[in-house]
Image (cartoon, helix red, strand yellow):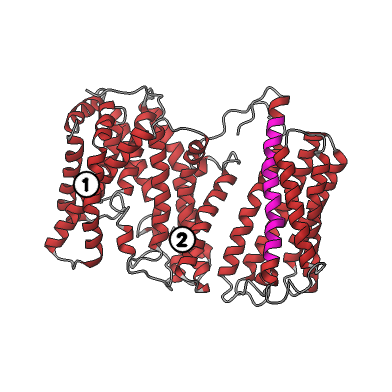
Amino acid sequence: MTTPATPSARRADLDWIRVMAFGLLILFHTALVYSPYDWHVQSEHRLSWMPQLLTLTGPWRLTLLFLVSGAAMSFLTARRTPGQVLKARFERLGPPLLMGVLLLVSIQSWIEAMDNGWWGADYLGWLGHEFGPEGLMDGVPFNHLWFVNYIAAYSVVVVLLMLRPGLIERLAGWLAPLVAGARVVWVPLLYLVAIRLTLYPLFGSTNALVGDWYNHAQSLGAFLFGFLLARHEPLWQALEHYRRLTLFIALAVLPVLVFQAGYFPNNIAYDAAKFAIQATYQWAVIATILGYGSRYLRQKDGPVLRYLTDAVFPLYLAHQTILVVAVWLIRPAGLAPLLEATILGIITFGGSLLIYEVVRRVGWLRPVWGLKPFPPARPPAPFTGRRRLLMVGATAPLLVLIVFLVSVAAYPGFDHASQYLSELGGADARYPEIFNVGVFISGVMAALTGIGIGWALMALTGARITGLMTAAAFLLAGYGLSASSLYPWPDPRHMVISLGLGIQIAPLLILWGLRERRDVPRLKAFLISAFAVMAVLTLFTKHLVLPGTVNDLNVGWWETAYATVLIGWAGVAAVLLERAVRHEATNRGSVTIPA
C-alpha cells in the first residue's frame, strides 16, 4: 500500500529537476545545430565529437521529464474530480499547443523549407500550404511541441484511470512493492533494457503519437511511474539510500556509451549491447538525480525557484523557434564555432526570457503561453503603472544586446575597432533592417523608461519639475534613437541620434530629486558612478583630454563602451528605482505589492 504525503505538500526538488531538465533541453537543441544528425536548420560547422557530447544527456533527459510530469499530475489530481482534472489540463496545455503549432512551429518549418530549397514563397503562402489539405496529409506539424502533445494524451489516460474508483490505488499498491528497497535500482533498469531490446528495433522512436509504441512504453511508463508513486514516501527513501550506487553505475557505463557513440561500427550484436548500455545509463542517471534531489533540494524553495518554475513552460515553447531564426540569420556571417554557439545560446535564452517577461504581464497572453490566468480583480496596487514602465527600462539593455549581437553576426567582416555602431544599419550591412528596427524599438523603450523614471521621482519625492525634466531628457534621447533609424548612416539626418547624449544629465537630475531621501544609498552611489564614467568617456571621445587617445584605429571600441554605459546605466537605475517605488507603495498602502 502506498504511503501518501500531504496532497498540498510542495516538492521543491521536483521543481528544481524540471527546471534543470528543460534548461538542458535548450542546450541539447543548440548542440544539434552542430551535430552530424539531420536537424531543422544547422550551422556550417559540423563537429565530429558532438554525438559523444549529446550522449551525456540524450538517453535520460526526456524520460526524466515525463516522470516528473507524472509526479506533478499526481499532486494535481489530489482532491479533484476527473472532470476538474480534464478541464485544468485542457486549459493549461490546449491554448499553448494550438498557438505553438500555428505560429511557433510554422515559423520553424517555413525557414527549414526555404533553407532546403523546398519553398520560395512568402510566409503566409507557407501557412496555406502547411495547414491546407496537401500539408495536413503528412500530419499536424508538432516539432518540439510533440512533448506537450504526449503530456496531453497521457493526462487523458490518467483521467480515464480516475473514472474507475480504486483503480489507481490498486495499481500503486501493486507497483510499490516491485520497486521497494534495492529493487528501485534493478526493476526499472531491467524494464528499460527489455523494451529497448524488443520494441525499439521494431518501432523506433517517431514522436508521432500514433504507432509510437516504443516511445509510449518508455514515456508513458515513466509518466505513470511518477504519477502512481510520487506521494509514496518509501520510494524516495530508497532512491536517497541507493543514490551513491546508481551514481557509480552511471559513471561506470558512461565511458562505454561515449566510446560506442563515436567509434563502433553498426551491427546487430553492437546494437544489442549499445541498447542495453543506454538503458542502464538512462535509469542510473534518473535514479541518481531523483535521489540526490530528494536528499538535498526538497526544501530548497524560494523566489528564484518560483520564478524559474513559472518561466520554464513559456521558455520551452519559445526557445526552438528563436534558435532556428537565430541560426538562419547568423549563419551567413561565417563566425567561428565557439563564438557562433555563444551568440546562439545568449539569443535563445535571452530571447525566451524576454518573451516570458512580456507575456507574464499581459492577462490575455498568459493562458496562451501556458501560464495561469491572473487571479480575480482586486484593488489596484499603488504605483503599478510606474513600476511597469520601469520594468520596460530594465529589459531594454537586453534587447539592445540581442540586436547588437545579431546585427554583428549578419555583417561579415565588421571591424569593432575602426567602424561605428551606426554602420551596422548602413548601406554596407547585409541586413541593415535588423539594426535599424532594433534601434527604433530601443528609442520607444527609452521614452517609456523616461516617463517611468520621472513618474517614479514624483511618487518618491513629489518633485514634479525634476521628474518632468528627467522624463524630457529621456524623451529626447528616445526620439533621437528612433528618428536616426529612419535615416540610416551615412544620411546626414542620422545625426539626430546626438539628441541621445542628453541622457547624460539624467543621473544628476535624479540625484537632485532624491536629495532628501536617506533610504536609497545604493541608488545614489550608482548614479554618481554612472555620471562620472560618462563624463570621463565624454572627455576622451571629444578629445578634450589626451588628444589622440581616441583615433581611427580604436574609435569603434570607444563608441561601444560609450553606448554600453549610456544604455546600461538607465537599465540598472530603472531596476533600483522600481525596488524603491515598490517599497514606498508597501509603506503607504495596505495592499501588498508582489515582488
- Mark 1 lies on residue: 249
* Identity of the residue furthest to the right in this view: 465
Image quadrant where residue 44 sits = bottom left
For the stretch drawn in magenta, the main secondary structure is: helix
1 or 2: mark nearer the eye: 1
- Mark 2 lies on residue: 108
| Residue 203 locus on image (x, y percent) | 21, 55
Q: Find the distance from the CA under tag 1 to the CA under tag 2.
A: 39 Å
Q: Secondary structure at mark 1?
A: helix
Q: Amino acid at mark 2?
A: Gln
| Residue 240 locus on image (x, y percent) | 28, 34
Q: Secondary structure at mark 2?
A: helix
Q: In the drawing, does residue 478 fall left or right of residue 335?
A: right
| Residue 302 locus on image (x, y percent) | 50, 33
Q: Nearer the viewer, residue 8 or 20?
A: 20
Q: In the drawing, does residue 124 fall left or right of residue 396?
A: left
Q: Nearer the viewer, residue 487 or 245?
A: 245
Considering only vertical position in the picture, is 266 above or below 569? Answer: below
Q: In the drawing, does residue 132 fall left or right of residue 579?
A: left
| Residue 526 locus on image (x, y percent) | 71, 46
Residue 563: say if magenta: yes
Q: In the drawing, does residue 36 fall left or right of residue 574?
A: left
**Image: magenta residue range:** 559-584
Mark 2: few, some, or many residues within 10 Å (few <14, many ≥20)?
A: many
Residue beneath the point at 53% across and 58% down: 347
> Does the rendering let one see residue 127?
no
Residue 190: say if magenta: no
Q: Quadrant of the C terminus?
A: top right
